[in-house]
Image (cartoon, rainbow, N blue to C red):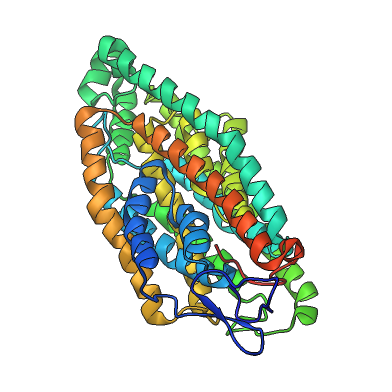
Amino acid sequence: MHPDTICGKFINCGPFTTCDSSFICHRKPPLYATPLSIFAFILIPPIIGIGLFGGLGGGVVKRPILEWMLNYDSAWSGNATDALIFASAILNVIISLFQTHPESPERPMINWEVSLIYGLAIPISFNIGSSISNFLPILVQIVIQCLFYFIVGPIFFLMGMGEKELEVQKEQNAELLQASQLMTVEQAKEFQHLEVEQTALYRRFYDESCVKFPILINIIVIGNYAITEVLMLMRASPNSIIFPNTVEECGQWNLWFLVIMLCLNVVVVLSTFFIFRKNELLKDQCKFQPRERYFTPASRFFKLYFAGFAAGFTGGFIGVAAGIILVLTMIDFGLIARVAVASANYCYALIGLTLFSTLISQTSALGVSDELFFGGLALIGVVAFTVPGYQILTKYNIGWVICFFDFGLILLNIAANIGFGAELAHNFGYNYLEKITNTCELPTS
């Protein structure tokens, strides 16, 4: 499993590894071809492609495929997962930009205001979570992941039933469907009895809501990400190419960078809140989409922000589940399933960018060709499974199926976590599960 693991009569190396004369485990090359590895690589694209339906990324294959079936250690599986997440997330966002809202075709698929709020929280929370996770032993990580899956699994199942019932109600009740659709300026003027100034305001917000790629929102989100990531890469890490400090040297240095990141994030968040809160107060004056308020009252804005913070922190802390929390909370805040998934994928792309920047700034366990291979598997998954899947969901109006996809992948990961832990204990002994694998590292999946 690990190239520095001692093996012998009572300790096995696991599949794809050999025990040499010095009783040290050595793994065969990452892409070593066997019937089992070929079968595992064939499984990755459909799992990635289907997982993206529910806002899940490459993390869903880390335990069941990369670590359990292929016997990669945490460094190998982490780098491979980073490549999978980055490639699938970026391509999926590009595809979402060309899709339209299922109920209001003139609007984009991504809810940009919700994505903005989540996007302010995710970069810093993901970095904090991943930094803390580096001090946890493998057993604790497995237990936390399983507990999380046991909690959210039934929630996804029940949410899927609720979304299915809501779709049926919208088909049977035209008023319920119209309430979530965007009225044109002429319809609003007629049914809401708007005055001249109100009509002008309504027209302005109508035009803004139909923009496929709002420049200001993306400048804020990407700018916030860039600032956070630059500060994160300036932190010290034993594997960092930029600041290759030892573990003893990086504690206090990294703490100050964390304080700076938090302070800057507070400034950006509060500035964004006051700017967009003013816009929502104007929306109230012209009665524009009264059900879509994310900055007023203030409590709603901070609920959204902390939901994004929880998603990023959980994704960094336990290595998976960011997409699950994103989709769950966005649906809970009133977004329909397909819009929630598209918005979650946009936010998840920020995590992909974070992992990619870490991948290129540190010494990688995988070679460039191996990383390109896994990135290619992700692209195949998106093109061959995600795109046709979106078309089917839209054509038959069955967005609620997304929740059941996620539920199935959650069951798969529960089984994989238990099996992975049992296999490690069998191969290397129970004490191995209590080892802390990394300290003072930059984020990885």
Residue 396: give x, y in percent of width and height.
21, 28
Identify the residue at horizontal 47%, vertical 28% (top origin): 157
In this rendering, position of residue 36 left or right of residue 424: left
Identify the residue at horizontal 60%, vertical 36% (top origin): 150
Quarter of the image where the C terminus is located: bottom right
Identify the residue at horizontal 42%, vertical 67% (top origin): 83
Residue 185: give x, y in percent of width and height.
24, 26
Q: Quadrant of residue 399?
A: top left
Residue 228: give x, y in percent of width and height.
58, 64
Identify the residue at horizontal 69%, vertical 69% (top origin): 437
Relative to residue 248, is residue 310 depicted above or below?
above
Relative to residue 176, is residue 163 depicted above or below?
below
Relative to residue 166, is residue 35 depicted above or below?
below
Most foreground residue, 425 or 443: 425
Quarter of the image where the N terminus is located: bottom right
Tell me, yes or no, if residue 305 can be seen here: yes
* Count of numbered badges drawn on the protein: 0
Most foreground residue, 292 or 206: 292
In this rendering, position of residue 159 left or right of residue 94: right
Tell me, yes or no, if residue 192 can be seen here: no
Most foreground residue, 42 or 56: 42
In this rendering, position of residue 113 left or right of residue 443: left
In this rendering, position of residue 82 left or right of residue 184: right
Furthest-bottom residue in this view:
21
Residue 299: give x, y in percent of width and height.
62, 31
Q: Quadrant of residue 392?
A: top left
